Amino acid sequence: MANVRFEHVWKRFGKVVAVRDLNMEVKDKEFLVLVGPSGCGKSTTLRMIAGLEEVSEGNIWIGDRIVNDVPPKDRDIAMVFQSYALYPHMSVYDNMAFGLKLRKVPKDEIDRRVREAAKILGIENLLDRKPRALSGGQRQRVALGRAIVREPQVFLLDEPLSNLDAKLRVQTRAEITKLHRRLGTTFIYVTHDQVEAMTMADRIAVLNNGVLQQLDTPQNLYEHPANVFVAGFIGSPSMNFFNATLTGTKEEMYVDTGGFRLRVPTKIANAVTQWLGKEVILGLRPEHIHHVEFTPPNINAQRIMAQVDVQELLGNERLFYVVAGNHNFVARVDPRASATAGETVALNVDVDQMKLFDPETEEAIYS
């Protein structure tokens, strides 16, 4: 097992900077997820660990050695790609065993590893089949099995679930989480899906434009985002943002969006006194905006009025797309709440959950 460490790592493709001064450590046996939008540098980062891309500047450590100039085959890593990349003319058994045969591993050891991996993944009955006779989920398990038999120090997974349907993705991500727990190996997993990241990771590294925005546990990213990008990326539906001004006094402070005004709780007001009279960005998550008739007890609720534009019933919840002043935002309300398009509704905001950001730097001033 091994940790993976980045020291001032850059990756350039000509004049394009894909990864910018990355400093990060993945702990031994940790499940770390790299997440961000397309083009943020997450797959490039994974490929640099694997040795499929050269490091332009800086060092990557796997365990106690720098691997910048170590060939991929000698890095003791295994990679699972978005494409299953199975040999169509080989059986499942031979696909899983192929890499070990190339390394001249003894036959009985190959057989032990393949059958053990097949048992872990529940594909023992598929070992004699060819890939064309497998479903997408079964092919993904074979690709995972091919990595498991290597018994590497580090597993690298690059969007391995993106070719699966929605139900199978949920099932397979649970299986990968259990697999990590069972193997006790370092996993580094790339996805653009923040739900995958939140449900699977021990810690999440959020990337944007090649820059590490925040590295933390899923809960801390959700509750304490470092900036507007992280706040908007983590959570579904994403956080609502409002251009606003802090008005009043330290003892009675308000955040005024022009469409509505909220009293700032004392704890938050004390932390942002220096911003009084200045512009800020207010962040409110949809789940902290409730229909007035179905507001949870024991929250610090303040009422605002908004006009319903569209509503979506999702079974266990209802989304109101509403307008207040010149602001469009989303409220996640109780499914029993109902309104027609154009109707004005009363909403309760849990003001203890508000986030405030600097409009110039977009860094959090209260999170």
Image (cartoon, rainbow, N blue to C red):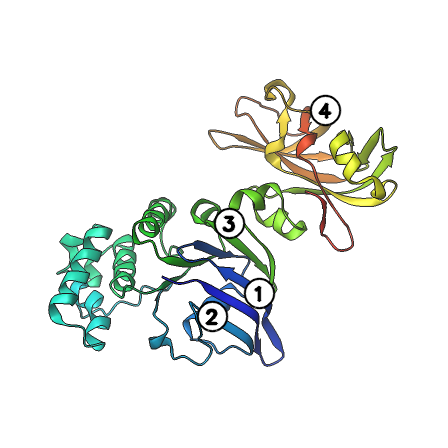
The label shown at residue 303 is 4
The label shown at residue 61 is 2
Discs 2/4, front:
2
User: Badge 4: few (under 14), some or many (20 or more) residues near its Cα, within 10 Å?
Assistant: some
User: What is the three-letter code of the residue carrying label 1?
Assistant: Asn
User: Badge 1: few (under 14), some or many (20 or more) residues near its Cα, within 10 Å?
Assistant: some
Is 339 left or right of 191, judged from the image as shown? right
Discs 3/2, front:
2
Q: In the rendered image, which residue does mark 1 sit on? A: 23
- Residue 236, relative to residue 260: is it above or below? below
Frontmost residue, 271 versus 36: 271
User: Badge 2: few (under 14), some or many (20 or more) residues near its Cα, within 10 Å?
Assistant: some
Quadrant of residue 167 within the rendered picture: top left
- Residue 345, relative to residue 78: is it above or below? above
Q: In the rendered image, which residue does mark 3 sit on? A: 194
Provide the secondary structure element on which disc 3 rests. helix
Q: Position of residue 269 (x, y in %)?
A: 79, 35
